[in-house]
Amino acid sequence: MDGSGYYLPSAAMAVALTVKAPALARAWRDPLLRSVCVLMALAGLVFCFAAPPTIAQVNEWTGIVNFSAPLVYCLLSAFSASCLVLMVNWRGGPPARTRRINRWITAGYGLVIVALVVLFRLGSTPVERLRDFDTYYARTPYIRELIVLYLVALTVAGVAMNVMCGRWALRVKGWLRAGLLIIVVGYLCNLAYLATKFTAVIARWRGADLDYLSSDWAPVLASAGAQISAVGFCVPLACRRAGDSWQTWATYRRLGPLWRELRPVAAQSHRGVRIAWWSPAALRVTQRESDIHDGMLGLYPYFDAELRLRARDAALASGADPEQARAEADAAMVAAAVRARAADPEGRLIDAAGAAGVRDTPSEPSPPASLDGPRDLVRMSLALRQSPVVAAVRGRTATSSGSETHE
């Protein structure tokens, strides 16, 4: 694998980290977000410093032959620890237990990193090797132990990740399970990478030459494993956000019939602020709900509680459940109130209600006792378009208005 095979994944991780940077600055204390950013940073560094051109350049800059070898192995160990920490934080649990496990993981791999540096200082690597360091120095004192130590540390992390992800996947469903299974596939590639490394190193111990497994096959497996695992970490988060966004836009669309029904009323007493077309979906839903509530406040004097009770009984008789019947009854009452208000352009009913003392606080009316409790605006909106009970009330209201006009 040439340099581009290393630098492209590194650049992708850098872009992802840049996108996450503002969120990290706002919520630095969030352990899950912090773990994600640390993992992406370490993954990018591993790919960057494992590229043969970078290995040669770092050796030249430091003036130490093969200095890149322990550097890359330390980064790999830190990356393995960050994966375990991210998985522990992602899975959650009692905060004290989570922090204790993370401290053990960090301390354990911190000791591995220190041991790697010490073993490299004790060993001798006079010949620069850009691609086959592991196999070339497989029988060199201290360097042999360094190679085995980093491979064992990566193997422990890979097995632990597969066990944790596999067990967790059996207890969850949906996109989270899909992401966990993708991570398992990615770490199977990592275990295959480690198997090729171990095989090539052991072959050297026995006097055989299987260096191509370490220098040619292992980098491809490592790159594939890291990228597949990254997809696994991203899938649940990205799909959850996409699902939330879809649900929010669906709510916005479903509120459309009720919003359009009340729009003429809300327009005359609108107290809200116009929002830009590029505003988030959640803000647009809030604005639409505010418009609906403003319209319903303007219709309050025209609400007919008896009509609502009759509509609810009709909905229940047609087989609707209590919640649906309540929504249909509210929608029928709103539809009738809109027509009653249109038939009273001078607001004589409002004046009469005020004179009779029906509303003590005209600017902030309260719903009557029969209407207490929050309304399901989405169900009301759908009932305006679909409910035969609402259609019947509209028909009767139109007929009544026509008769009054004729008279």
Image (tube, rainbow, N blue to C red):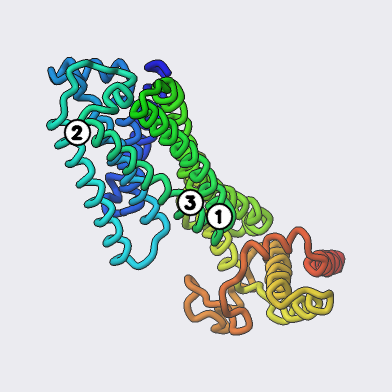
Q: Which residue is mark 2?
A: 142
Quarter holding the C terminus is bottom right
First in sequence, mark 2 or 3: give its number.
2
Look at the numbered discs 1 and 2 and tell me whether their residues touch, using CB distance below 8 Å: no
Is residue 268 visible in this depiction of the protein? no
**Is residue 37 positioned above or below 265 on the image?**
above
Give the camera-side residue of 223 and 296: 223
Q: Which residue is mark 3?
A: 283
Look at the numbered discs 2 and 3 and tell me whether their residues touch, using CB distance below 8 Å: no
Percent position of residue 116, x then y: 20, 37
**What kind of residue is marked 1?**
Arg
- Nearest-to-viewer mark from 2 and 3: 2
Residue sitting at 43 percent across and 20 percent down? 212
Within 10 Å of the Cα at label 2, are there few (<14), some (14-19), or many (20+) other Cα atoms? some
Give the camera-side residue of 326 and 8: 8
Q: Secondary structure at mark 2?
A: loop
Give the camera-side residue of 206 and 111: 206
The span from disc 1 to disc 3 (Cα, nearest Å) is: 9 Å
- Nearest-to-viewer mark from 1 and 3: 3
- Judge left or right: residue 157 versus residue 290: left
Residue 149 found in image quarter: top left
Residue sitting at 20 percent across and 31 percent down? 141
**What kind of residue is marked 3?**
Leu
**What kind of residue is marked 2?**
Tyr
Residue 140 found in image quarter: top left
Within 10 Å of the Cα at label 3, are there few (<14), some (14-19), or many (20+) other Cα atoms? few
- Nearest-to-viewer mark from 1 and 2: 2
- Judge left or right: residue 118 versus residue 73: left
Q: Which residue is mark 1?
A: 288
Q: Secondary structure at mark 3?
A: helix
Percent position of residue 104, x then y: 26, 56
- Judge left or right: residue 330 versus residue 172: right
